[in-house]
Amino acid sequence: MVEESEMIEAENVLDYTKMLRRELPSSITIEYLHGKMKGREKNAVMERFAEGEIQVLVSTTVIEVGVNVPNATVMMIENAERFGLAQLHQLRGRVGRGSAQSYCIMVNCSRDESAGERLDILNRSNDGFYIASEDLKLRGPGDIFGLRQSGDMEFKLLTYLQTPIYLRLSLRK
């Protein structure tokens, strides 16, 4: 999240950046990046990060695609259980682009066992197609034309005499 919300209990970029600036030595430059920033601001931050002027970048998922910073070696994703596996796979692909060893640390803040099992799929594979397929099996496809991003799909096939006929698809094992 960009900033604190009364609706969702989760870390936000602005407060987390302030906290890190208090806790880490002042010799470490810490900045933030989020989608509400103007394009010029985002580019300036990313250029400084790529040049090594910024050592810690706190960001929303705006960094998910199109970011190539070979010297980025550690990524920590808090509340990883809130993301789809395909998105997590994209995020972890932002580190390890250079020759140095890299790490992607996914913090699971859920007590739900299924969240840990779901995240374990990422430990078993780097194949994006396999990961997306497993995620689809676990969470379901959601609505093609609706708002739900997971769950079983319902297609309205035919309305005859005001009685809708539904087809329920389940892609789970």
Image: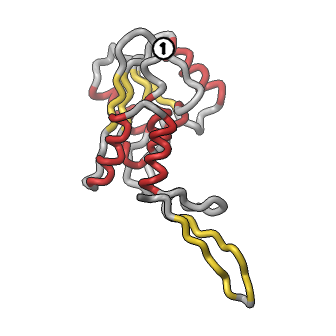
Q: Which quarter shows the C terminus?
A: bottom left
Looking at the rendering, which quadrant does residue 161 occupy? bottom right
Residue beneath the point at 36% across and 19% down: 102
Residue beneath the point at 46% across and 39% down: 130
The one of 8 and 70 positioned closer to us in this rendering: 70
Seen in the picture, residue 97 relative to 123 is either above or below; the reply is above
Q: Is the image coloured rainbow, by chain, by secondary structure, or in one colour? A: secondary structure
Across and down, in percent, residue 47 comes to 56, 16
Decide if residue 79 is in sight here.
Answer: no
Across and down, in percent, residue 91 comes to 47, 32
Locate residue 155 relative to residue 95 in the image: left or right.
Answer: right
Mark 1: secondary structure: loop
Across and down, in percent, residue 16 comes to 37, 36
Across and down, in percent, residue 12 comes to 42, 42
Q: Amino acid at mark 1?
A: Pro
Locate residue 111 relative to residue 159 in the image: left or right.
Answer: left
Residue beneath the point at 50% across and 10% down: 51
Seen in the picture, residue 58 relative to 150 is either above or below; the reply is above
* View extreme (front): residue: 173
Locate residue 8 relative to residue 107 in the image: left or right.
Answer: right
Q: How many marks?
A: 1
The residue that label 1 is drawn on is: 70
Seen in the picture, residue 132 relative to 71 is either above or below; the reply is below
Decide if residue 34 is in sight here.
Answer: yes
Looking at the rendering, which quadrant does residue 99 occupy? top left
Q: Count neighbours of disc 1 (C-alpha within 10 A) and say few if under 14, some if 14 to 19, many if 20 or more.
A: some
